[in-house]
Image (spheres, helix red, strand yellow):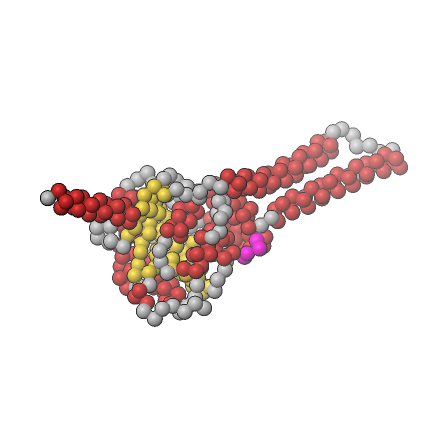
Amino acid sequence: MKKLPTNHNNLLLSIVIPIHNEADVIPTLIDRLALVSRKLPVTTELLFVDDGSKDNSVALLLESRHRYPHIRVLRLSRNFGKEAAATAGLNHARGDAVILMDADLQDPPELIPQMVSEWRKGTDVVLMKRRSRAGESWLKRTTASLFYRLINRISDAPIPVDTGDFRLMSRRTIDALNQLPERNRYLKGMFAWVGMPTVTLEFDRDPRAAGHTKWNYFKLLQLAIEGITSFSIKPLRLALVLGIMSAGAGGLFGLLEVLKALFFGVSTPGYASMIAIITFLSGIQLLCVGILGEYVGRIYMEAKQRPVFIVADDSDENEKAYGSAITMKGVSNDQNH
């Protein structure tokens, strides 16, 4: 394990929080984070990444900087999605360690001191595992559980079950993660792929404090497909197996019909069996083409090499530019006098 400097007060902890239309919860979130930050033995940076919010989320954050100067706001040029927003935060975080968490307060900020304590002992990753998920429907809990178990069966880098983005990562873990160049990003899988010594802590997840979730079942399905196709080629092998099985079944059925006609003079009347077989084979073909299309689409997106995100504004950079302008103006006035 990496040994940290003796003087922990010189260490910087970045807390990265992607937001999208979270104005209802931001005041409570900031107050709770500020209270926790005062208790930490390290300096804290609160890095909020605005993913194209349409409400007054950014205005609330910028206003809060007057009371809490350690708040930093990174505003993306448009809505790129949560994975891209989190990636932007991890790329711009300056801390010796980084905590990634959601803005809805389902990840309790009060657990941060415990996470920092484990990091100070020398671990690289402090992973927060959900012991319970309050405020979520039975269907969502069940489908999430099934998905994690499915992707662990087919992925080369097993993803810890019942975990989200809520975790602490050391600087060397963040540096390794930032080297991964892919555009189609499934962060939970990327975290698992990077590895590093990990400590797992369990917690009870709270219900959303305010506002509404941005994740409907269609978006969750898209994320699940992204995760599966990003970290496994087994669906392609499944398509191959289905093709072999359907071709074999079709061949055996045809041979059976020929033998029945030759030895027993029996032929299948009508077209029902033929239609059933054609429908079955067509379904298999479409499934295989669809699986192949998912992978080809990802190759296409990677080949274009577009950036994962574009930063429109960084509150710290704007403040520096404003300060420099004031200084230059003062110099100019002095010279005129």
Can you see residue 142?
Answer: no
Q: Quadrant of residue 215?
A: top left
Residue shown at the point (34%, 71%) measured from the top left: 6
Of all residues, the one furthest to the top in this rendering is 270
- Residue 263 vs residue 37, the one in the foreground: 37
Q: Compared to 161, does 88 lie above or below?
A: above
Task: Please state if 166 lies on the left or on the right of 210 as rendered.
Answer: right
Range shown magenta: 155-159
Location of the N terminus (image quadrant):
bottom left
In the image, 68: left or right of 168?
left
Q: Position of residue 18 (x, y in %)?
A: 37, 48
Q: Is residue 158 magenta?
A: yes
Q: Is residue 213 visible?
A: yes
Q: Nearer the viewer, residue 237 or 110?
A: 237
Taking the spot 43% from the left edge, 63% from the top edge, the residue there is 124
Residue closest to the far bottom: 6
- Asked if the stretch drawn in magenta spans residue 214, the answer is no
Residue 279 location (% of width, % of height): 67, 34
Location of residue 305 in the rendering, given as x and y in whole percent from the top left corner: 49, 41
| Residue appearing at x 42%, y 45% in the figure | 84
Q: Is residue 318 left or right of residue 121?
A: left
275, 333: nearer the viewer: 333
Among the 4 quarters of the image, the one containing residue 152:
bottom right
Q: Quadrant of the C terminus?
A: top left
Asked which quadrant contains residue 32, the reply is bottom left
Identify which residue, 274 or 23, lies in the foreground: 23
